[in-house]
């Protein structure tokens, strides 16, 4: 049977249509495959970028954490070592904490590569009489090139401890002398003519003198309060400058003092020469002042004038000092000294005599403390300090001992007594006690070496101005 031409044409047309459909499907398939490939590539690129961004963010966070760890370690250094080793900053050769070119470097993540480099800049040097500012610079690194820099300012001052001899009651006698520091009291100071004071107070920049919110008298006695008519150095029976100026003790201040010191003689220039301590201040609301010339009206005026407080150490500070002493093996519950005496060997030693429970009223013989003596005003100043805390007991110093320390007797009467000092002894430093008996022939003094080597435990550190620096 033969095929007609028209049938052949129809078959060809159908074949061509099928070919066109197949070609179109192939093109569409290829386009879809290309689109899917592009989408897959985009998703892969975005995923990789996100992973890389996440890794970089993680590394940046780790670098910041490392930098802040450096800040924390620098603060720990300041609390334990103070600022004496930073005098040479920023180019200390023997102390990496004060070397900007070769700072203190520590690896804190051995597996992750986290490290920090930190040094401390002396912006304003602390001098024990003026506050200081120290800037900590810390750079943290973590993996690859991740790096973050931070800084913080640390304000350094001395806690409100006395820079002199402070006691509720002070008694003079014999030939005891107090040089280059002052006596502060919230009670009577007896036998003033037997306390030989000389030199300029190196802590406050005024002549060494007695400052009390009670009465200074030339009579014998004991107790916080004394008869107001028994030989006070400022005599209420006098009038005008004769009442308020005692030429033998022109710089002494007590509650019988006043602002009329005259214009001539030993007292004439006191107010004009030292207005910060003898000028009228602290108005009392009744037309008078808490401080004016030889007047210190009350405890609050005394504390405000010289930056004091009582009790001198807070419970938190006592706990901290106790912990330091325990860590140094300088913690004692009795006054019994070993055969060779107490020999703390730390550069910043703290001795704590916790006597209240086991040995209440015990007397710590400061002659048995070894290794912390020197002559006043040395040409080479030792880089060391000693704090002695006696809780629940008393202390004595005699027999040619030389001792440099900050002494705190924290208990009130009948404890907290620095007993009669006899024999030739030298004590350089500060004393806080309930009662100080200066009836021997000891020499109590202060010098700039002591002030510049105050224990780090007596420093107050306050951090602010935290800054993250952009790279």
Image (cartoon, helix red, strand yellow):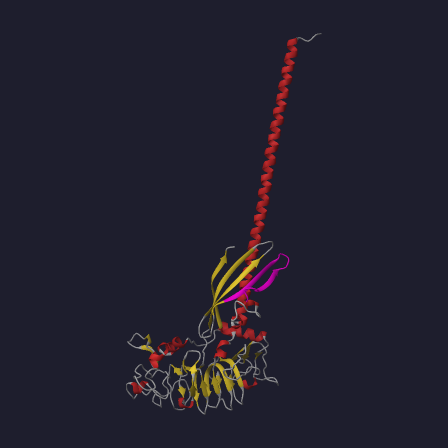
User: Where residue 471 appears, x then y in whole percent?
Assistant: 52, 55
Residue at the (51%, 90%) spot, across then down: 424
| Membership of 100 in magenta stretch | yes
- Using the rendered view, name the quadrant where residue 48 is placed: top right
- Which residue is the extreme one toward the top? 1
Can residue 15 be seen from the camera position used here? Answer: yes
Can residue 297 be seen from the camera position used here? Answer: no
Q: Main structural element of the magenta stretch: helix, strand or loop?
A: strand
Count of numbered tags: 0
Q: Is residue 313 above or below residue 210?
A: above
- Which residue is the extreme one toward the bottom? 174
- Which residue is the extreme one toward the right? 1
Residue 96 or 457: which is nearer the viewer? 96
Q: Which image quarter is the N terminus in?
A: top right
| Membership of 8 in magenta stretch | no
Q: Is residue 208 above or below residue 132?
A: below
Q: Is residue 235 above or below residue 53?
A: below
Residue at the (48%, 79%) spot, across then down: 448
Range shown magenta: 99-121
User: Where residue 323 appears, x then y in whole percent?
Assistant: 55, 73
User: Where residue 398 appears, x then y in whole percent?
Assistant: 52, 89
User: Where residue 171 appears, x then y in whole percent?
Assistant: 43, 88
Residue at the (65%, 15%) spot, across then down: 12
Residue at the (60%, 41%) spot, across then down: 44
- Using the rendered view, name the quadrant where residue 68 is placed: bottom right
């Amino acid at each position: 049977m033969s095929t007609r031409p028209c049938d052949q044409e129809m078959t060809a047309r159908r074949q061509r249509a099928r070919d066109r459909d197949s070609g179109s499907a192939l093109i569409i398939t290829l386009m879809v495959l290309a689109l899917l490939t592009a989408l897959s590539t985009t998703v892969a690129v975005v995923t990789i970028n996100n992973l890389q961004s996440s890794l970089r963010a993680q590394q940046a966070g780790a670098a910041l954490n490392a930098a802040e760890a450096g800040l924390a370690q620098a603060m720990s250094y300041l609390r334990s070592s103070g600022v004496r080793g930073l005098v040479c900053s920023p180019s200390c050769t023997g102390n990496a904490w004060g070397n900007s070119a070769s700072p203190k470097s520590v690896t804190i993540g051995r597996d992750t590569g986290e490290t920090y480099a930190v040094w401390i800049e002396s912006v304003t040097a602390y001098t024990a009489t003026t506050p200081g500012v120290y800037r900590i610079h810390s750079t943290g690194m973590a993996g690859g090139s991740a790096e973050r820099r931070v800084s913080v300012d640390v304000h350094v001052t001395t806690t409100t401890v006395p820079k002199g001899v402070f006691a509720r009651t002070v008694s003079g006698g014999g030939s005891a002398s107090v040089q280059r520091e002052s006596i502060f009291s919230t009670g009577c100071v007896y036998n003033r003519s037997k306390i030989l004071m000389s030199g300029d107070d190196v802590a406050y920049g005024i002549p060494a003198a007695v400052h009390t919110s009670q009465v200074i008298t030339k009579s014998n006695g004991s107790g916080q309060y004394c008869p107001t008519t028994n030989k006070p150095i400022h005599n209420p029976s006098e009038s005008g400058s004769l009442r308020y100026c005692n030429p033998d003790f022109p710089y002494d201040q007590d509650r019988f003092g006043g602002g009329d010191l005259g214009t001539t003689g030993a007292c004439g220039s006191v107010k004009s020469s030292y207005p910060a301590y003898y000028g009228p201040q602290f108005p009392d609301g009744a037309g008078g002042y808490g401080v004016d010339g030889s007047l210190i009206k009350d405890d609050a005026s005394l504390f405000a004038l010289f930056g004091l407080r009582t009790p001198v150490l807070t419970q938190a500070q006592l706990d901290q000092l106790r912990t330091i002493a325990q860590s140094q093996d300088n913690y004692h519950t009795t006054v019994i000294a070993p055969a060779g005496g107490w020999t703390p060997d730390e550069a910043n030693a703290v001795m704590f005599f916790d006597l209240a429970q086991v040995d209440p009223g015990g007397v710590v013989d400061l002659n048995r403390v070894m290794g912390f003596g020197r002559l006043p005003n040395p040409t080479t100043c030792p880089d060391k300090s000693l704090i002695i805390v006696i809780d629940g007991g008393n202390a004595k110093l005699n027999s040619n001992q030389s001792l440099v320390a900050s002494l705190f007797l924290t208990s009130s009467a009948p404890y907290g007594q620095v007993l009669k000092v006899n024999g030739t002894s030298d004590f350089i430093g500060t004393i806080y006690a309930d009662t100080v008996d200066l009836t021997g022939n000891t020499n109590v003094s202060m010098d700039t070496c002591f002030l510049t080597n105050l224990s780090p435990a007596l420093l107050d550190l306050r951090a602010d101005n935290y800054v993250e620096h952009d790279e």
